[in-house]
Amino acid sequence: MTAARTTLFEDPAKEERLPPLPGVMPATSVVPLLDAVTVDHGPRDLLGRFFLLADRAIRNQGLRLAYCGDFSILKAINEANRASWYPMLPCFDSRGGAGPHNAYFFLAYDAEEVVATQVGRVYDMPDGFTDHCRSLRLMYDDPATAVDGESCTLLGDAGRVGEGIRGRVVFSGGTWCKPGKARGRGFAALLARLSRSFALARFGTEWTVSSVRSSHIAGGLMRAYGYTRLDYEFKWRSPIQSGAPSTTEDPIGLVHMPREELLSDLGAYMTKLNPSSQAAE
């Protein structure tokens, strides 16, 4: 689907120097955020203003935002920061079928390195989120390529709720903020909203779904992300430990948000984003 391109921000973004990325050279698939944004779906004015304000809020913190569709770059960043970041889930990797036609990721960077990321994978789910998990189609375009012993299931209330999550869905995740540089500065809250707004604007998503560890929910992360719906349990198992495995002591919850709630939350959040913002709370 094609729509007229809207320029959101006249800015010297094209003069920016992208940081050296671990293991790769900067690629043409890495571009400043606002050069990548088109609003093909959803309320153009609201979404356009949000992308502009989000970019400015990050700039006020001395960082830049970029979009990328080359998942080998994400993999390289993930591997270079394994001390503070679990391996990526297969759905956020080219081996699981992620590419610019069905996925995206954002990176925030300073003059030295990438300091934060956020990923989204988009699906058409006429049969529901629960079945996509059970069949491993959430993780792999072709479940036959899954590693022996891998499983993805929704238990209890999450399984029942997942049956009703249908249509075009974005599974948002891969949130990472580098300790000492980006962690604890409110970036995760902004990146979560950036992910689901971008998915709506480009792909016309009807639902946003993510998974959050129980210990992080207790620490206020779910509230910071803007989610109000939580059900247990999202359970991922892999013998090669891709992604954060769920445990009895720290189960993973399924958080989910329909489009109407996305837009309502976004409007409220935007009151915190203005050109003089000192932080993206």
Image: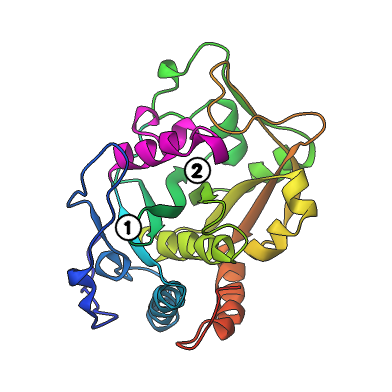
> Label 1 amino acid?
Tyr
- The dominant secondary structure in magenta is helix
Q: Which residue, given by chain and number where applicable, does mark 2 sit on?
A: 126
- Alpha-carbon neighbours of circle 1 within 10 Å: few (<14), some, or many (≥20)? many
Query: Magenta stretch: residue 180 in it?
Result: no
What residue sits 23% from the left and 68% below the top? 16
Q: Secondary structure at mark 2?
A: loop
Who is closer to the viewer here, 77 or 66?
A: 77
Local SS, label 1:
strand
Q: Position of residue 147 (x, y in %)?
A: 48, 15
Q: Residue at x 53, y 18 (%)?
A: 240
Q: Give the label on residue 67, or none.
A: 1
Range covered by the magenta-colored residues: 70-96
Q: Residue at x 47, y 59 (%)?
A: 195
Q: Is residue 111 above or below residue 61?
A: above
Distance CA(mark 2)–CA(mark 1): 28 Å
Does residue 247 appear left or right of residue 149 in this picture?
A: right
Q: Amino acid at mark 2?
A: Pro
In the rendered image, the quadrant that contains the N terminus is bottom left
Residue 74 magenta:
yes
Horizontally, residue 173 falls left or right of residue 245, namely left
Q: Position of residue 40 (x, y in %)?
A: 32, 68
Rendered view: 43 above or below 194: below
Q: In x, y percent, where is residue 77?
A: 39, 41
Q: Quadrant of residue 243?
A: top right
Answer with the quarter of the image where residue 156 lies: top right
